[in-house]
Image (tube, helix red, strand yellow):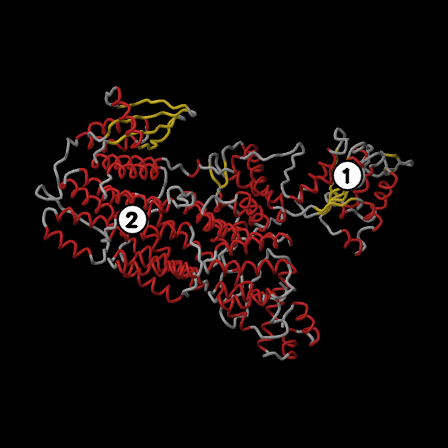
Amino acid sequence: MPDEDPLVTALVDEGRFQEAFARLRRLPRGPNTTTVSRQLMLAELLEKTGQLADARRYLATLNRSSRLSDSERARALLVEGFLAKQMGHLEEAQGAFRRAWRYAERVDTPELACWCQLRLLGVSADLEGADLDLSLLSSLKRNIERAASPPLSIAHQIFLAEYHAKRGELATSRHHGSLAESVLSSFPSVWLRGLLDLHQSCLSYLEGNYLDSLLAARHALETSSRSGHFLTQVIAQADLAAAYLAVGQPARARACLASALRQSRKDQQIFGLLLETLAEAQLIVGDLAGCAESLSTARDLSIQLAQSRSAWHRAWNLRTEVRLLQRRGCWQESLSLIRNAGLRESPAAPSFTRAHIESLEALALVKLGLLEEASGVLHRVVQEALSASGSYRGSILPASAALSAATDGDTRAVSKCAQVLRIVGATGEASTLVEIVEQLIALLSTHDEHVGKTLAADCERPLWRPTRVMCHLDSSSRLLVSPASDSTELVAFLSALPDLTPDPLALGEESVRCLVSMNWIQCGSVIEDVDGERRTVVSYAPAVSGLMHESASSKESQGRIQVCLGSKQSRRYTLDLTPRESGQAAAACHGIVWLLASTHAVDSTEPRHARSTEDDQLTPEVDDSGALFRSPAMLALVASAKRVAPLGITVLLTGESGTGKEVVADIIHRASGASSEAFVAFNCSTVPRDMVDSQLFGYRRGAFTDAAQGFGGVISAAEGGTLLLDEVGELPLETQPKLLRFLDSGEVQALGEAIPRRLRVRVIAATNADLENLVQLGRFREDLYYRLNVVRFRLPPLRERREEILPLVTLFLAKHSSEFGKNNIHLSDAAREHLLLYSWPGNIRQLSHELRRLVALSESNSVIDVCDLDTRLRGKHEVTSLPVIEGSRCVTVRIDKTLVEAIRQVESAAIVDAMESAEGRLDLAAKRLGLSRKGLFLKRQRLGLP
């Protein structure tokens, strides 16, 4: 992008869009101010800062131009897709991102292709909500490795974290979030920091950590004000409102939503989503009319503007609509709405919201008197929640309390509601308190109408969650009831629980004994699984026969609950229970099972040194030469090398030091048909210049002083095989004619010999120097250069074939672990990300030495993390561009750029600053820069500056 201001580009790279836009608008207007590249940058910055109408105007102008290159067309389509997505037209955005990807592929620009693929995957996940396109995901991963762009790597990890969070895979989501955090700490970006904070807020919410969610949303709001990214700022306020609702502060939530609504326009999709969140806040404070109006307005806007909703937002809005109907007492209508939505049959339905809605379904069934069906729904929710890590407990408690009230006595139901209030008040989502309080009012009203009315009046006020509650009870308290049975066994079980946890079989047996003694289960068993073979090792079942047995078995299969107890000595144990039909017994059984599941989850956390990644377990495919190539460029090069290998012609290998030139030479030798013959490597730079001749061609005994015996020479040692002349550019000028004669005639004349000998040797030359430049400087013979350069292969540096970095890492870890007698050493995923992003100026050799150092400093059974890497590999923690302070005369240049790019950035910054200081007077600006007027004009023209 030669006509873009490098300082604007640097600000964009840092995610400071508002500052980049302000600087771009301040640049002096000239003949280049209307270039395509400048207009593209303006359109991109206008979209990111929320000025959508102006962005559309610039985009329309660009689309009328026929001068757009493929890369410029791809960038324009990316902006078009962003605009369509913000307006809620997800299908249109999907099409734009797909077309942008096609254009990006034509120019083979991995970074641009990655952004197109990432946006396409994101909108496809929102639109369809199903599994990701695995082929597209695999292509994206390969392109990200090739691009080696820290912002792309961070954005990729954030996208994966968000996707897995919406699917209920919270542990996987947190893992990807931690990878993004690690890379972001080394390569700061204000915009990506805000995106990651938004994700952390949502993830903490799904995990039930509402205060953490609140803090992350606040941080996202702060960072978005520095980046100027419009959507991040608005969504941060929406997340802040959701967190305030969860902790019982609806007034603050409504203030956040009011601010976000003022910043948004009605034709933007975010406006409707904010209205739906506002409806939830109104529902919590009892403003049912306002809630209905907000939902209706959001629905009408969506229909009027033909907007699409993601699966996540559809499910969340359904939850609010169902709760509104239930607050109005429309239980049958709420049940019909849930079942007509077909949430359970939809693979796109997020597990978090599905659990909440199914709990509301169970509550409606209880209110309609369908107790057996309600119990079945609750059992299903509990069973699914046991295998997930989401915060579901609070969502099912209102339905569980209602079921208890419908099946047990009022006194026990009041006690159950009080317990539920304590649990949800301490750990759950505060909005769930509304349903529980209403049930408690209904129960108390049956005994004391005045108490019920008083509590109902208090319930109309906002529900504020207390930070700490201390409850003092005695035997006269109406909240205490007599136990249904002796609780001695239960106390004994809970006391022994810490001791039972390490032994899953003993834990399962004692669990069954306890639940039977409390009369809470119909039957139960502990199942042992060894390599897929399952058998019952502990069981309890009542004696039944005939038709009664079949009926009991049918009911038991409907209400069964299974929970994993853990593993020991390769044996996995599962507790299988069927609660009694009593609501109180079922609720108590659920509580015990949840306790067992949470105990196993905490206890099964493996130590850091025992963890490994999937990549660690992969054995890299290495051919018989020891080579490991994965990139398309190297695979094509090796294929060509093998084709010319049998021909016996001279091959020249060029490339940076450490790229594997000797490995490729060995491949050619093995494929030449003479693999059984000698392969001799000679480094021309390691021998004193005055001895190179005698080392290559040999010498006769007595040919010079100290020549006590003759030496055949390196070329003679390679007779019938292959000679690799490494660093051939260092060959002395006086030796080059003899080498040329050997290449032309095959004759070698040793020092002191009168008659030359004819040898049959295949020569492969390798160098990391520019031989053409050496020829021009007179340091290398031109005729020898052309004689060596018969077939030439350039080995790309490792930074151009990053697909090979991770396989090489696995190879070197295994190699050096064996060398030092260590085992089970792995790299953390965050460390792998940093290795992928490093430029590796020393190429494969540097990578091998770094892994060797890491293995040498590590212990067996350990994990190498980012903190263990060399400081150069951890990235730069400081800001790497022009400071934002006005009038600053400093600019920081990244040293991992090419020299041409670094010089260009410095020259452009100096010229722009001189022109601004001289107020456009060329003579004064040229004098300050030490240039002539014409020289300044030509340099500005070359750099594309106005």
Instruction: Specify the quadrant that holds the N terminus.
Output: bottom right
897 vs 218, nearest the viewer: 218
Q: What residue is shown with label 1?
A: 644
Check disc 1 and give the amino acid type: Val
Q: Is residue 256 above or below residue 514?
A: below
Distance between the alpha carbons at the discs numbered 1 and 2 = 75 Å
Where residue 628 sits: x, y (%)?
63, 38
Q: Residue furthest right?
A: 754
The amino acid on which the numbered mark 2 sits, given as a three-letter code, is: Ser
Above-or-below relation of 690 to 63: above
Question: Quadrant location of residue 365?
Answer: top left
> Could you say whether the residue bearing mark 1 is in a helix, strand or loop?
helix
Residue 921 lies left or right of residue 382; in this view the side is right
Q: Which residue is mark 2?
A: 334
Question: Could you tell me which quadrant the C terminus lies in?
Answer: bottom right
Residue 589 picture quarter = top left
Q: Picture coordinates of residue 283 (x, y %)? A: 27, 56
Proximity of marks 1 and 2: CB atoms separated by less than 8 Å: no
